Image: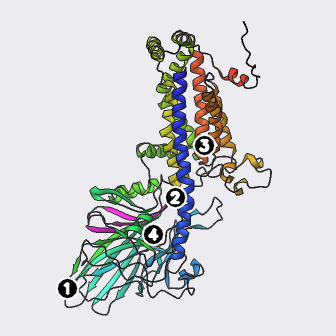
Amino acid sequence: MISENRNTILAIVLSLIVLLAWQYLYAGPQLERQQAAIEAQQAAEAARQAATSTGTNPDAPQPSLGDDASAPATVPGTGTFVDRAAAVNATPRITIDTPRLEGSINLTGGRLDDLRLKDYHETVDRSSPTIVLFSPTGSPDPYYSDYGWVADPNVDVALPGPSTEWTVEGQPTLTPSTPLTLTWDNGSGLTFKRTYSVDENYLFTVAQSVENSGAEAVTLYPYGLIARRGIPETTGIWILHEGLLGVFGEEGLQEVDYSDLEEEGSVRPPQVNQGWLGITDKYWAATLIPTPGTDFQPNFSHSAVTGNFQADYLGSGVTIAAGSTGETSAYLFAGAKETNLLDAYEGALGIERLELLIDWGWFYFLTKPMFYAIDFLFHYFGNFGVAILLVTVLIKLVFFPLANKSYVSMSKMKLVQPQMQEIREKYGDDRQKQQQALMELYKKEKINPLAGCLPILIQIPVFFALYKVLFVTIEMRHAPFFGWIQDLSAPDPTSIFNLFGLIPWDPSVVPLFGPFLMLGVWPILMGITMFIQMKMNPTPPDPTQQMIFTWMPILFTFMLASFPAGLVIYWAWNNFLSIAQQYVIMRRQGAKVELWDNLGSMFKKKKPATDDKS
């Protein structure tokens, strides 16, 4: 029994270490990164930088950096408008209106720099503002996409830039059924056209053409860029990448943190003909996707002068002969990282590994199948919480043979306790002989002394896979369960310290200890089920082991209170199923269930120790 308890304690302690590491790496870094983001934004200067290199050699053409030296007037001394609306209204624009997007394209520069997501709101309240993805230069948080052409450094040709005033051809509104074409004549024989098309979701197609009515051929290089000013507020958690990223042919996925790019200045992956690059947040992303099969040079850069982070690519040169037209096109994904939508784009357009916009993590082989299972059940039952409960049952069924074998072995261990006690008494302090005799007993009775660890060890990777699903997938964002749980991806909002809302007081405002006082209903239920599960086993003879088993459920209850409610619901439900499974198996094996005895012993007074005078 000592061996069984030791193994069980080891598994629990390992789990505890991981959870403590999560708490340490989440709470502290989150505050630090948020503060760093604020400081970086405050320190961003209003100066402008004309260009940034993206070629593989210093003489290569340079795409235009996202800042415009001729931007409209802003608040003196700040470089920003009072609000985003003022920045949007400061320049002429063409409206974007689709079933899922609203915004506008700036005719000054031809940029896509105003975009909102109609389906997503800032809070659970549907009346709260919709999510802002792109904002123009001069707004508090500039973030936008731009396309254009560059020439060789020694070629003198007028090209459209951030201050170019484009004119509109045809329908002045961009919708899924009406593309938008912008034109600009450089006055020297070149007419530039930029056509935006958009689907019903979040994919733009950007087609660029150059008509050469001059007497000589000209070679131009197409580029696309996504620029963002300053470091945005991030979750700051190590299991999720937020920043710049891309997939580049055989090189695969490359992730670049904001902080790393600040230090290095630029990161230049190899030239490829398959892949994509962009900037990702937890739930949203803006991604440049050159037409698959065309060569492009990707680049990530940071300007210390402007504070801009930029993902851009430079395409192969297009030679436009006199009297002819040169063309190129690319895709732009700008929206919510919905799993099924990204998979559909990847398959339909041949985009390499677009699914990796979502950070599925190290347990990819568990995380994504688990999401598909939960999503499948959600479409049948209409509730992600119910889907999680059903997936938990399916997981228990999958691992039933292993868990059954484990509980049978544990039951046998209880049945041979008298023999184990005899062995310990017989060999006393001779540990080696004692262990040899115990191993012979295990072999004779076909007992696996490690069986007690298996149910807990099995649960750990599943726990983290589900946590990843709840944390990174937008489908779980603001997904309700029942009653007070209106967001499965957020912690249980109730607290026992204000009697679950009966007292008008918010415990979370308490300095330092506030997060630990948000001890809701579901974390308490999880702690109770964990406590019952432990009490189903005999009380360990060692006082230290007794203390660990007594305090472990309480510690886990407080720690998991800050985890997503969906994860706590899963753990509580899994504990309940494990209790029922263990109870049935132990009864069938004829082993005594210690639950009631252990619970009763908690209320009995211990007899004081007396000296033996005989």
Residue pointed to by mark 4: 176
The span from disc 2 to disc 3 (Cα, nearest Å) is 21 Å
Name the image quarter holding the N terminus: top right
- The magenta-colored residue range is 274-302
Identity, as a three-letter code, of the amino acid under mark 1: Ala
- Looking at the image, residue 575 lies above or below residue 317: above
In the figure, residue 389 lies in which quadrant? top right
| Colouring used for the render | rainbow
Residue 34 percent across, percent down from the top left: 55, 64
Q: Disc 4 or disc 1, which is closer to the eye?
A: 1
- Dot 4 or dot 3, earlier in sequence: 4
Q: Nearer the viewer, residue 545 or 398?
A: 545
The x and y percentages for residue 451 are: 49, 24
Q: Amino acid at mark 2?
A: Gly
Is 366 drawn above or below residue 68 in the view shown? Answer: above
Q: Is residue 204 above or below residue 447?
A: below
Q: Which image quarter is the C terminus in?
A: top right
Q: Earlier in the sequence, mark 1 or mark 2?
A: 1
Q: Which residue is mark 2?
A: 236
Q: Nearer the viewer, mark 1 or mark 2?
A: 2
Q: Where does label 3 land, which residue?
A: 568
Tell me the element at label 1: loop
Q: Nearer the viewer, mark 4 or mark 3?
A: 3
Of the two numbered discs 1 and 3 in the rendering, the one whose residue sits closer to the viewer: 3
Q: Furthest-right residue in view?
A: 503
Query: Neighbour class for label 2 at 10 Å: few (<14), some, many (≥20)?
Result: some
Instruction: Work out how far the residue at label 4 is from the one at label 2, CA to CA, in angstroms.
Output: 36 Å
From the image, state whether disc 4 or disc 2 is nearer to you: 2
Badge 3 local density, few (<14 within 10 Å), some, or many (20+)? many
Which residue appears at 76% of the width and 25% of the height? Answer: 603
Would you say 180 lies left or right of 608 here? left
Residue 299 inside the magenta-drawn segment? yes
